[in-house]
Every structure is written in C-alpha cells, then in structure tokens.
Amino acid sequence: MKSYSFRSGARFAFVTLVSAATGAPMLALAAPPASTEVTAPQMIDAFEGTFGVHAGQRRNHIKGTCAVGEFVGTTDAAALSRSALFSGKTSPVVARFSLGGGSPEVPDSAPAPRGMALEFHLPGGALQHITMINVPIFAAASPASFRDAILAAKPDPRTGHPDPEKIKAYAATHPDATALTELASHHTPTANYYQTTFFSIHTFKFIDAKGTEHPVKWRFVPRDGTKEMTAAEMKAAPHDFLEKNLIERTRKAPAVWDMIVYVGEPGDPQDDPTLAWPESRKHFTAGTLTITQATPQQKGVACESVNFDPLIMADGIAPTNDPVLLFRSPAYAVSFAKRLSGQ
C-alpha cells in the first residue's frame, strides 16, 4: 500500500490568526489566561471581535468557493463501515473550498488553512458531512484554548496587527498549540485548492455490519499532487487566485481526490486533535471524490445554503469524544443562525 506523507500548506496556530486578522480596525483586547470553559455564543463573539461582523456571511472560513461533484466508495471501506457512503454506488456531493478566518479580504497567499467541506447525498435523503483543513492536527486541544487564540490575535487599532506580546502570552499559557506551530514552521501555503491534501484532524469511528467500532482518521489526497508555494510565488501572487484557478481547472477536466483512511491501534489518541498518529498505521483507499464544477459563492449557489456541520453523519460513521469535534456543531449552529437572519 502506498504511503502518503504530510505535505501541508497552512501555518495555522498563531500565524493563521495573525494573517487573517491583519488590517481589521478594531479595539485591542488583552489575551486572557488559559480558561477551561467556553460556550458556542462566546466562541462566535470571539470571532466577531477579532475579524469584525460581516452581515449574512460565515464567521469562520468566510472566503470560499462552491463546487459540486460525486463520490464512489470502495469495498475495503465497506468492510469497516456499513455507511451507504461506501456502497460502491455514486453519491452526489456539494462542496465548499475556503480559507480559514473571518476576514473576507484575506489574500489567497496568506498562511491561512485551506478548507474542504463536503455534503454527501445518500439514498433515502440521508446526509453525510465531512469538513477538513490542510493540516493533520489542530491548534488547540479544547474549545476554550482555541477561543483564547482568537482573542490573542485581535488587531491593535494603533498598528492594525495583533500585539506580539499577547501572542507570546498565549503561547506561554497554552502548550497545546506547540505541536502545530512547530509543524507549520516547515510549510508554506499550497498553490491551489486542487493541489492540496485535506485532513480530518479528528478521530472518528467506522461502525461495521456487526456493530464493531473502528477508530479512523482520513485524508483526501489530490491526484494533481500536493504543491506548496515558493517564497517567490507567494510574493508575486495576486490577491485572489484560488477560486479562479479552481474554476478554470474544473472546466478543463474534473479535479480528483482519493480518500485514504488510517485505522487506529490500541493506545492511539482519539480525543485530542493536537496529536497525530504514526504514518505507519494501516491505511487504504476508501473512495474517490470527483469535483466537476466550481462557481463563486453567492446566493442561490448550492453550497451557500449548507451549514457544513461535521456531526451530521449517516449510519455507519460516528464521532469520538473529542471535545473540539463535539463543540463544532453548536458553534456552527450559532454562526448559521446569524447568517440566515442577515446579521
């Protein structure tokens, strides 16, 4: 079985939040000490405080591109999951590619995470959502720690940039951010959405026909290869290019990703998204995603009405007790409600 090593383009953690927030003229707020609890409304308040309020738009991954396509699962996956996603039949897909952060003005060459969100339409009206970014681990082990990172990145109105001292204070009190910060220091943004590998970040459970649970992580590996930008390419890149390039790519031929599933072993962490599994874990191709068309996000386009809640799952796939994963659903709901109401 071919091994797929990590080739990411995102510097998440501090760098992502800093680059995405740059230029927003908002009041400064001291980074709070590490806290243990946060509510969904408080999380969305933090995003709005750092990135501003953009009426009728998403609070995170605000800048994006809609797409459609199809997915076909494999028999290897069907042995571990009874989900209809792996029946071998074609499932229509609504997709959204995006940049992390709450600023619609973030340049495409910024070290913000590239995101892929998928809604699979299964027989009988069932839905399966998968949301990913292009790093294998997350920046925080808890929702509260992630909220603290967002607050620490709030721009100082005097400079238009986050205060370096507040970023340092966050780092000193949040050791869970260290792993991704170190990982990101060795990578640059990917050149295109269709040249990006996307990771589940969280551990999930595949449930087979007998009810046995199997811990899994997955990644979607592009057949176009994963390509990071050089320093010269980042400097010369136009402000916006990801959407244009994806639209042009799909006009020529479909963009294709293989879904590679890694199976956990006893002792592998399941509830901490900042911890990676060894690359040596058993893995296999679980299916193929084919994106046939991409369009700008706007009212009336398929992906704009979708709340890509990662906890919307069909029978055969289930969440673990990862606190960040479980928190995403209520946080997405708050953001979605504000977006629908035009706030």
Image (tube, rainbow, N blue to C red):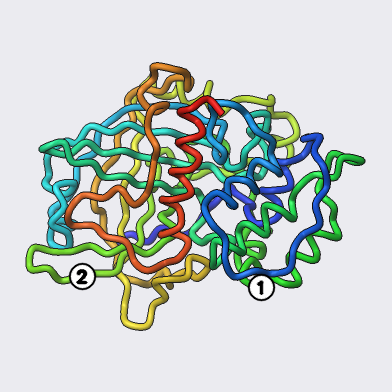
Q: Earlier in the sequence, mark 1 or mark 2?
A: 1
Camera sees residue 300: yes
Rendered residue at 90%/41% (across/down)? 159
Figure quadrant of the N terminus: bottom left
Quarter occupied by residue 186: bottom right
Q: Are marks 1 and 2 in contact (CB under 8 Å)?
A: no
Asked whether 79 or 342 is in front, the reply is: 342
Most distant residue in the left direction: 210
Quadrant of residue 320 in the image? bottom left
Circle 1 residue: 175
Amino acid on which disc 2 is placed? Glu
User: Are there few (<14), some (14-19), or many (20+) residues within 10 Å of tag 2?
Assistant: some
Q: Is residue 178 above or below residue 299?
A: below
Asked if residue 96 is positioned above or below residue 132 in the image, the reply reads: above
- Going by the numbered disc 1, the residue's amino acid type is Pro
Q: Is residue 109 above or below residue 42?
A: above
Q: Position of residue 326 (x, y in %)?
A: 41, 59
Up/down of 299 relative to 209, above or below:
above
**Tag 1, which secondary structure?**
helix
Relative horizontal placement of residue 258, taking residue 80 as reference (left or right): right
Residue at screen point 49% across, 45% down: 226
Q: Quadrant of the C terminus?
A: top right
Which residue is denoted by mark 2 in the rendering? 213
Residue 305, percent across and down?
A: 38, 27
**Residue 127 picture location, percent across and down:** 23, 41
Distance from the alpha carbon under mark 1 to that under mark 2: 31 Å
> Callout 1 environment at 10 Å: few (<14), some (14 to 19), or many (20+)?
few
Q: Residue at x 42, y 67 (%)?
A: 322
Q: Is residue 186 visible?
A: no
Please tell me whether mark 2 sits on a helix, a strand or a loop: strand
